Every structure is written in structure tokens, then in C-alpha cells.
Image (tube, rainbow, N blue to C red):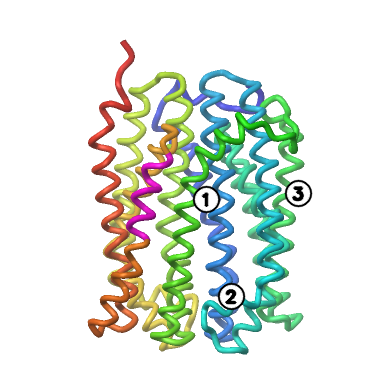
Amino acid sequence: MQGTKNLTTGAINRQLFNLAMPIMATSFIQMAYSLTDMAWLGRLGSEAVAAVGAVGMLTWMTGSFSLLNKVGSEVSVAQAIGARHETEARQFASHNISIAMLISVCWGVILLLFASPIVSIFGLEPAIAAHSEVYLRIVATAFPFLFLTSAFTGLYNAAGRSKVPFYISGTGLVLNIILDPICIFLLGWGTTGAAIATWIAEATVLALFIYKIRKDHLLGGFAFFTRLKKLYVLRIIKLGAPVAALNMLFSFVNIFLSRTVTTQGGHIGMTAFSTGGQVEAITWNTAQGFSTALSAFVAQNYAAGCYDRVKQAWYIILRMTLVFGSICSILFIGYGSEIFSIFVPEEEAYRVGGDYLRIDGYSQLFMMLEITMQGVFYGLGRTLTPAIVSITCNYMRIPVALLLIRAGMGIDAVWWAVSGTTIAKGIILTGWFLLIKGKLLRQRT
């Protein structure tokens, strides 16, 4: 199929590495958008970081919605490629793009119109909340860019060409890095300038994706928008909805926890939670890179009946992620405050943020394990299983945090609730897979 790579033959190690490295780098680039904003805004003060951090929770929710199409693209198109169903692959691609545009416009309008009551949920001081509202209204108009970019990224990952999203996203990051100090400091726009810089960068990334897809004639060419057909819509929803739901519900949990840390620690608590989450994303995005590569690889090989290659790929990725997770645990536990101070140099902020990273460090290995297992389940087309585990454990964070707060642990109660439930997710999901893998990966007779 034109513009795609066949992952059902060849050296597994090399194919996984070639897939995972660009995906991982792309994830880091997407994370770096927020970290760049945080790093520059940290020079304005913790109030500016708190204002953008609150919106970051909503941006996370938006990214969760977009996973419906990203995972829908990666799994449905990859399985069609593996089964050599070219027409079906193009239909799935067109439907994913159409659904992405429809959802993004509706969601963006909701956040644009109701920015004030939504921001009020976080309980921020009035001046900080006002900055958050302006920031949210600007970035909400860029949500169609984010959704379509996510869907296009999924298409290239499914096609085995993960380097393309890396190069395009890298271009957007460089542009954002250049524009941030200009808009924030030189033009004196503060948090509004950070939003404008991000808007321009994301619009540029989308334009580059559209140009590249047309030039590559990916999948032999397909329409960006099409009249939706029930068969393809239901398949995409079946694959993507559990993943989107678990991440969206996860964002609701984080919004509640954000309100809790604001109550316990004021804007310093919000700064520690939002910025600490961005720092932790270093581990998360590394695991996600391996997981996404594993998902695309498993999808093609499972559809082609190459079950031995599926198991070998799982073993390889598992070893890689366990090593990296151990390294991150050591760094977070031993040097949490030093790492946090790179982004927010205020002493009180990096003290509280350092506690967050130290406590969360105990769970990093298990988080890597959980996300790796998600990649296996997604590639097999069984996206509901990891969603059940993640949603259940994520919502347990609320009662656990409240219970520990009543026990007198203060803001650390939230950090321990997050760390403990992450450990549980890694153990449960791995155990679940080990119980059923024989049935799923049976050999062909």
C-alpha cells in the first residue's frame, strides 16, 4: 500500500526501535509545548504558572477527546494494512478525520462560551482566574488544530512512518520556543502571549501535516472529509472510545484533585501539581512512545496472524520500559526539588513540588508497566480492558486523598493517593494480561 511500511516481516528489534524513537520524540515535543510555557511563565511568578496550569487540566481533557481519533487511526488503519484491505484503510482514515473535526469544533465552542464558570471550578484567586479565562478562550479556538494533528499522527504511526509526525511536531516546537519569549516578555502579553504563541505553532503543524499527506499520497490517497457511514463510525468508536473515556475521566479526577490541592496549599499547591505533572510526563511520554509503537506493530502482525512476532515484541518493549522506569524513579526520589526548580525557581514552590516528585517517584516503574500493557491490548483491538482498570483506580484517588487528608497528611495526601493508585494499575493490568495471553495469542494450527 502506497506510503506505508510492512511490519509483519523483518527484524523485530529494529522495527520497534525505528517506530518507537520518533513516536517518543514526538511525545516529548508535545510535552515540551507546555514545559516551555511553564519555564518562561515561571519567570513571571508562581501566579502565572497556576493560571496556565489550571487551563492545562482542560487541555489534557481535550487531548483525551482527541485520543478517540488517534487510537482509532492507529488501530483501525494498522489492522487494515496488516490484512491488506486497502479500501478499508482509506475509509477508516477519512472517517477518523471527519469525526475529529466534528468533535473538536463542538468542544471548542463549549469551552469558549463557558470559560468563566469552568475556570471557577479550580477555586483560584480572582486575578489568577481572570488570566486563566483569557488563556482558555484563545487556546480553545486552536482545538481543531490539535484534534486533526492527533488523527494525522495516528495515520502515520499506523503506516509505520512515525518519523513524519516527529519532524512536523519538532518544527512546531521550535516555532513555539521562538515565539514564547517574544510574546510573553518582549511584547509584554504575559500569559496571553503564551496562548498566542501556542496557537500559531499548532496552526503551523496542521498546515505542514496537510501538505505532507497530500505530497506522500498516503494510503494511495483519501478524502479528508467524507459522509459518515455507520460501519466505520462504530468500529472507530469501539476502538477509540474506551481510551478517550479513560483519559477524559482521568482529567475529571485531576480537576477535582486540583481543587483539593488549591484548598490545601493555595496557588503553590496548584503550581506543584500542574508543573509536577508536566515533569512526570517525561516518564509518561517515554512509555507512551514505546506503547504506541507496540500498538501499531501488534495491530499489523495480529491481523496478519503473526502471533510469535506479537509476543516477541512485547518482551522486548517490556525490558526497555522497566529499565527506563527504574532510572526515573531514582531521579525523582533523589533529586525531586532540584528537578522542579529548573521550571519554577521560587523556594516554596520547588520545595512542595519536590515532595510531589519524590512521592510520585515510587510509582514510575509501575506507570511504565501499565502504559506498555495498554499498547498490547490496543494493538489486539481490546481497548476496553485497560480502560476498566485505569478508570477504576484513577477514581479511587479521590476517596484515598480525602481519607489521608482527614488523617492529617495535608497536601502530601494527594501525592500519595496518586502514587499508590498508579502502582495498583501497573500490577493489575499486567496480571490481567498474563491470565489471558494464552487465549489471545494462540498459535494457528
User: What separation in Å lies between label 2 and label 3 (alpha carbons)?
Assistant: 26 Å
* Percent x, y of residue 296: 48, 34
Q: Amino acid at mark 3?
A: Ala
Could you tell me if residue 394 is visible in this image?
Answer: yes
Q: CA distance from mark 1 to mark 3?
A: 20 Å
Residue 159 point in image, percent of width and height: 58, 31
Front-most of residues 388 and 87: 388
Q: Is residue 76 magenta?
A: no
Compared across the picture, whether 424 is left or right of 285 comes to left
The residue positioned 47% from the left and 65% from the top of the image is: 252
Q: In which quadrant of the rendered image does the N terminus lie?
A: top right
Residue drawn 52% across the image and 53% down it = 27
Mark with earlier residue (2, 3):
2
Q: In front of the other: label 2 or label 3?
A: 2
Disc 1 marks a residue whose amino acid type is: Ala
Q: Is residue 143 above or below residue 232?
A: below
Q: Give yes or no for contact between labels 2 and 1 (Cβ–Cβ under 8 Å).
A: no
Residue in the image at 38% along x and 37% along y:
376
Q: Main secondary structure of the magenta part?
A: helix
Q: Give the residue at x 71% y 32%.
A: 216
* Disc sitting over residue 164 in the figure: none
* Residue 385 shown in magenta: yes
Disc 1 target residue: 25
List the residue tagged with mark 2.
52
Q: Residues within 10 Å of mark 1 (few under 14, many from 20)?
A: many
Q: Determine which of the numbered discs, if any, sits on residue 207 in the image.
A: 3
- Judging from the image, what secondary structure is the residue with disc 1 in? helix
- Is 224 on the left-hand or right-hand side of 160? right
- The residue under label 2 is which amino acid type? Val
Mark 2 and mark 1: Cα distance apart in space: 24 Å
Give x and y (percent) for residue 54.
Answer: 54, 74
